[in-house]
Image (cartoon, helix red, strand yellow):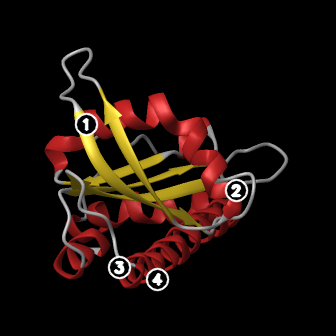
Amino acid sequence: RLLDAMRLLIPQAGCVVAAYHQPRDNLLVCHPQEFKDRYNALMFKRGVAFKGICRSQLPMQLHIDQAAADGIEAIDSQFAVLPLPLALPAWGVLLIERTGDDVFTLEELQLAREFAEKAAMASEEAANSRALRHSAEFDALTGAFNRRAVDFNLEKAFEPARGRNTPQPGLCV
């Protein structure tokens, strides 16, 4: 929804939100979806440079002229690079692409920065919610479901059988 709303306010060829925390917690959301391979290749090739820009927490513009390789179309575009304010060691970036030499205005960069801040807040809230749910359901020492989670899941599994007053297929009692 963020990318759709931003497309209405900031003219662009495409955009991508990329966030990196741990190998299993990476995120890459792009619009339009058919640019995903191209943006994946761009992040793979220039991710270290983007990470350095994100450390400064300052938005900037870059002209990227990337030759076509491995079936990925060439990129000759202006990019607005907006760091996502994430807690270390995580980092993330919002990239907005314009083809050709059309640069972004200061007002557009400020507006995009506000979108980036909202995106970071939403992703932090989602991560915190997931961590809270995990700590409520799993034992910290063993990593197994705690008693409350086991009771809840068993109750949920037996509920359909109680309604029919018949045994639930696949459950042994």
Q: Position of residue 5 (x, y in %)?
A: 23, 79
The answer to whether one can see residue 170 in this image is no
Instruction: Give the residue at the far top of this rendering.
Output: 70
Which of the 4 image quarters holds residue 146? Answer: bottom right
Report the Cα–Cα distance between label 3 and label 1.
Answer: 22 Å
Lateral position of residue 111 relative to residue 20, left or right: left
Nearer-N-terminus badge (3/4): 3
Residue at point 21% right, 25% down?
A: 72
Lateral position of residue 164 relative to residue 152, left or right: left
Nearer-N-terminus badge (4/2): 2
Mark 1, residue position? 75
Lateral position of residue 78 relative to residue 57, left or right: left
Q: Nearer the viewer, mark 3 or mark 2?
A: 3
Q: Position of residue 122 (x, y in %)?
A: 49, 75
Mark 2, residue position? 55
Tags 3 and 1 in contact by the CB under 8 Å rule? no
| Closer to the camera in the image, 13 or 150 | 13
Tags 4 and 2 in contact by the CB under 8 Å rule? no
Question: In what element is the residue under mark 3?
Answer: helix
Nearer-N-terminus badge (3/2): 2
Question: In what element is the residue under mark 1?
Answer: strand
Report the Cα–Cα distance between label 4 and label 1.
Answer: 26 Å
Residue at point 36% right, 30% down?
A: 41
Mark 4, residue position? 114
Question: In what element is the residue under mark 2?
Answer: helix
Nearer-N-terminus badge (3/1): 1
Mark 3, residue position? 108
Report the Cα–Cα distance between label 3 and label 4.
Answer: 10 Å
Report the Cα–Cα distance between label 1 and label 2.
Answer: 25 Å
Q: Amino acid at mark 4?
A: Glu
Q: Amino acid at mark 1?
A: Ile
